């Protein structure tokens, strides 16, 4: 279980995360929604160690993550797929995937191969293009690659930041469906940040609504989806 | 024809040394974001160590490998003792702004250069000394004909080719090489993938140290060794990286060979006094036509 308590993250004078508390239940999809600038990405970046928390606590599997570097946080089973199809475009598809498993090579050599085979099975299109440079892929394929890079680290918790950004609705559907299947099948815990609240709430178990760095609602996804007044006030539709 | 061939061979031999220097510079630039002015100071220091060993009766090859080890150790030590503390918590007050983060390590490398040169002066009394070549530096004669190249030219080209092949396969075929490329291209994604970027940084300094000590060993038989003889090589090597593209390993190597050939042709067909004019002209042309260098990426860097 991921537990966040009174988390505060600042960029200079701007308080991007302002006393956020919630938990992400194990084996479930929790989606964090909210308008632009609500602090969704900052929240994920603080969990994965890319940003330093000003105060508050983040606990994962009963251990605090505060003050740890991203490279050690990923070793504790948390994989972060940052916003914007974060792959390295000058490396090949295979190299991008291999990169995510480098730190496991010494101790889990046979499983690394297995994990790589699994993501190719999950996204056969990446297998076809494994020798191509990641920069030549389409947006959707790049997002699949970014997720694969995260999955080969064998995470228990997947932090997904706006996988739908800039993608065609059909591709978004496919990617979100794949992640949701993974979660149901393998017990992966997912924290999904989305601006596209509808598609996120459709697959999520719980929804956390952020506004200006504060939690304004934390409900089961279906209830959040049904609440017309919250939608109108914070999501604008 | 003979003159032409001799210019080609001499240029390729010295070009391969500049390529090594450029390789060392690009490695540290990509891996650690620092232009390392101490690089040829490190090379000078390790070459002095080799020279002292040879004077004391050790064989060339023992001295050769010990010098490489000293170069690697010096590079590692610079990162661990100077660069890492600078980017650590205690250094954060000095390095609060991006401008300071970009300049302070470079100034520190100049300081290290000063320390190395003074230390070499104190230890080895600053006198110029020769440095032996393992093979003859006179024109090779095959079947009574004097060839337009020396055995040492061939030796240099061969050693550098081996070094380049080892470096390339390290970067392309090993996990550590992939980790180094990934952290240079996108440190954030690399760290999220579990790559320890601080170890990668140290490794960049170490390999760069090895490459530059190799350059020192190969260049001194034609130069003479004193605490600041290698300054000039650094300038040429740096020009090579700018011509080839500061963020491309292949570019730096290519730039080194181009410069070596240009210098050699000016030397043979014009006069040695025009060498720096030619380098400057070449640099200007590249900066005007392709400011990022021949193989450099287009990302704009504001200084």
Image: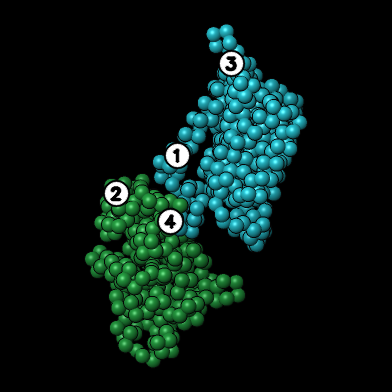
Q: Position of residue A185 (x, y in %)?
A: 23, 66
Q: Position of residue B16 (x, y in %)?
A: 58, 32
- In the image, farthest residue toward the top: B144
Q: Contact (CB < 8 A) between labels 1 and 3? A: no
Quarter of the image where one finds residue A78? bottom left
The chain carrying label 1 is B
Q: Judge by depth and name the residue closer to the eye, B38 or A25.
A: B38
| Structural distance between the alpha carbons of marks 3 and 2 | 54 Å
Q: Tell me what residue is drawn at x 47 percent, y 63 percent.
A: A49
Q: Which residue is mark 1?
A: B170
Neighbor class of circle 4 (other Cα within 10 Å; few <14, some 14-19, many 20+) is some
Viewed as shown, does residue B104 lie left or right of A72? Answer: right
Q: Chain A: what color?
A: green
Q: Judge by depth and name the residue closer to the eye, B295 or A177.
A: B295
Element marked by disc 2: helix
| Structural distance between the alpha carbons of marks 1 and 3 | 35 Å
The image shows residue B228, relative to residue B76, as above or below, that is: above
Q: Tell me what residue is drawn at x 35 percent, y 61 percent.
A: A141
Instruction: Decide if residue A232 is in sight here.
Output: yes
Q: Which residue is mark 4?
A: A135
Element marked by disc 1: helix
Neighbor class of circle 1 (other Cα within 10 Å; few <14, some 14-19, many 20+) is some
Asked if both marks, 1 and 2, belong to the same chain, the answer given is: no
- Which mark is in front, 3 or 4? 3
Q: Which residue is mark 2?
A: A113
| The N terminus of chain A lies in quadrant | bottom left
Mark 1 or mark 3: which comes first in sequence?
3
Colour scheme in the image? by chain
The chain carrying label 3 is B
Q: Which residue is mark 3?
A: B147
Element marked by disc 4: helix
The image shows residue B126, relative to residue A59, as above or below, that is: above
């Amino acid at each position: 279980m991921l537990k966040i308590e009174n988390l505060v993250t600042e960029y200079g004078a701007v308080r991007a995360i302002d006393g956020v508390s919630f938990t992400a239940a194990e084996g479930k999809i929790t989606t964090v929604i909210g308008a632009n600038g609500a602090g969704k990405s900052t929240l994920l970046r603080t969990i994965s160690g890319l940003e330093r928390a000003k105060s508050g606590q983040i606990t994962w599997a009963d251990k605090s993550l505060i003050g740890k570097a991203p490279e050690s946080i990923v070793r504790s089973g948390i994989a972060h797929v940052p916003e914007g199809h974060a792959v390295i475009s000058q490396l090949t598809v295979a190299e991008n995937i291999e990169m995510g498993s480098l730190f496991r090579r010494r101790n889990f050599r046979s499983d690394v191969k297995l994990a790589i085979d699994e993501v190719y099975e999950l996204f056969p299109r990446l297998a076809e293009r494994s020798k191509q440079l990641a920069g030549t892929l389409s947006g959707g394929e790049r997002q699949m690659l970014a997720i694969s890079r995260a999955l080969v680290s064998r995470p228990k918790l997947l932090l997904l930041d706006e996988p739908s950004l800039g993608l065609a609705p059909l591709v978004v559907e496919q990617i979100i469906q794949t992640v949701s299947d993974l979660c149901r099948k393998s017990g992966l815990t997912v924290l999904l940040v989305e601006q596209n609240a509808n598609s996120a709430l459709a697959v999520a178990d719980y929804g956390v609504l952020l506004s200006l760095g504060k939690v304004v609602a934390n409900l089961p996804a279906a209830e959040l989806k049904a609440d017309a007044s919250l939608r109108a006030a914070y999501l604008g539709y | 024809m003979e003159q032409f061939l001799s210019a080609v061979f001499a240029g390729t031999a010295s070009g391969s040394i500049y390529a090594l220097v450029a390789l060392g510079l690009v490695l540290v630039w990509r891996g650690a974001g620092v232009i390392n002015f101490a690089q040829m100071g490190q090379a000078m220091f390790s070459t002095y160590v080799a020279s002292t060993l040879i004077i004391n009766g050790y064989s060339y090859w023992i001295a050769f490998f010990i010098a490489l080890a000293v170069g690697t150790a010096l590079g590692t030590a610079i990162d661990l003792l100077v660069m890492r503390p600078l980017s650590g918590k205690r250094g954060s007050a000095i390095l609060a702004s991006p401008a300071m983060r970009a300049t302070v390590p470079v100034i520190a490398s100049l300081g290290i250069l000063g320390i190395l040169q003074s230390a070499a002066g104190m230890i080895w009394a600053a006198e110029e000394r020769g440095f032996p070549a393992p093979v003859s530096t006179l024109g090779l004669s095959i079947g009574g004909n004097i060839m337009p190249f020396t055995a040492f030219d061939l030796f240099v080209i061969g050693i550098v080719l081996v070094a380049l092949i080892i470096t390339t396969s390290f970067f392309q075929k090993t996990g550590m090489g992939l980790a180094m490329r990934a952290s240079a291209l996108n440190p954030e994604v690399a760290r999220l993938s579990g790559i320890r970027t601080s170890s990668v940084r140290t490794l960049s300094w170490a390999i760069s140290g090895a490459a530059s000590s190799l350059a020192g060993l190969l260049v001194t038989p034609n130069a003479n060794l004193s605490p600041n003889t290698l300054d000039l090589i650094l300038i040429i090597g740096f020009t090579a990286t700018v011509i080839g593209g500061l963020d491309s390993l292949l570019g730096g190597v290519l730039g080194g060979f181009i410069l070596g050939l240009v210098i050699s042709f000016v030397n043979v067909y014009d006069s040695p006094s025009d060498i720096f004019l030619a380098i400057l002209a070449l640099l200007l042309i590249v900066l005007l036509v392709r400011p990022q260098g021949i193989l450099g990426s287009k990302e704009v860097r504001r200084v």
